[in-house]
Image: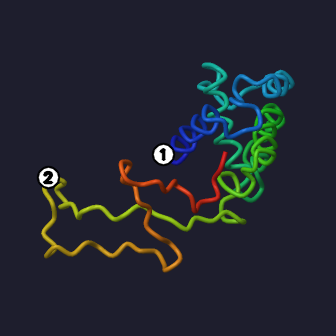
């Protein structure tokens, strides 16, 4: 399931302009690097370049977060290296180096959504908790976001993910 989530995040990063080349899936830089490789990550990446970028997001995240990197998992890593290396490089150049690809090294998040009303385990009705919401506050440094679109001028700031 985690690779599917990362794949979907890959679409968001690509199509919302998180890379220097916006979107990276249609950029000359990515296509030029793609043309240097003999393969794509898997059969689904053969569908089109948008899916290829999303699949390379999974590879890029693995490469950046797992000891031994992608080469420690896949002996033929060089067959797609130019594609995922381009994504990593462009993410760094776009200022993503402190956020989605490298969360935890210097990325921070100091805001969260408000807790929702408790839900019964059956999911069919509101839980009976005596009107007390569950305690979900992470720390004194994490404040609640105002998400009322009609009255809030506050943006989702407080997190280092920016593009």
Residue 152 is situated, as x and y percent measured from the top left of the image, at 42, 54
Q: Residues within 10 Å of mark 1 (few under 14, many from 20)?
A: few
Position of 79 relative to 100 (above/below): above
**Residue mark closest to the camera, 1 vs 2:** 2
C-alpha span from label 1 to label 2: 26 Å
Identified at 69% across, 52% down, the residue is: 101
Name the residue that disc number 2 marks.
Answer: 124
Q: Nearer the viewer, residue 53 or 20?
A: 20
Q: Disc 1 on helix, strand or loop?
A: loop
Q: Nearer the viewer, residue 3 or 146?
A: 146
Q: Residues within 10 Å of mark 2 (few under 14, many from 20)?
A: few
Residue 7 falls in image quadrant: top right
Position of 19 relative to 145 (above/below): above
Visual colour scheme: rainbow
Residue 111 is situated, as x and y percent measured from the top left of the image, at 50, 65
Q: Is residue 162 left or right of residue 112?
A: right
Identified at 43% across, 67% down, the residue is: 144
Q: Disc 2 on helix, strand or loop?
A: loop
Identified at 76% across, 32% down, the residue is: 21
For the residues labelled 1 and 2, say whether their Cβ atoms are less than 8 Å apart.
no
Quarter containing the C terminus: top right
- Give the number of callouts: 2
Mark positioned earlier in the residue sequence (1 or 2): 1
Residue 47 falls in image quadrant: top right
Please tell me the numbered disc located at residue 161. none
Identified at 69% across, 42% down, the residue is: 59
Residue 23 is situated, as x and y percent measured from the top left of the image, at 68, 29
Please tell me the numbered disc located at residue 1. 1
Residue 42 is situated, as x and y percent measured from the top left of the image, at 65, 29
């Amino acid at each position: 399931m985690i690779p599917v989530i990362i794949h979907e995040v890959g679409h968001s990063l690509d199509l919302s302009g998180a890379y220097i080349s916006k979107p990276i899936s249609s950029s000359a830089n990515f296509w030029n690097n793609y043309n240097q490789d003999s393969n794509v990550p898997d059969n689904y990446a053969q569908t089109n370049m948008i899916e290829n970028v999303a699949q390379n997001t999974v590879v890029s995240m693995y490469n950046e977060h797992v000891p031994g990197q992608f080469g420690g998992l896949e002996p033929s890593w060089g067959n797609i290296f130019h594609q995922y290396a381009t994504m990593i490089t462009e993410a760094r150049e776009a200022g993503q180096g402190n956020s989605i690809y490298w969360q935890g090294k210097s990325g921070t998040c100091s805001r969260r959504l408000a807790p929702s009303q408790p839900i019964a385990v059956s999911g069919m009705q509101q839980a009976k908790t005596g009107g007390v919401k569950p305690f979900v506050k992470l720390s004194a440094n994490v404040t609640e976001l105002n998400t009322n679109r009609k009255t809030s001028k506050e943006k989702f700031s407080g997190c280092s993910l920016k593009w």
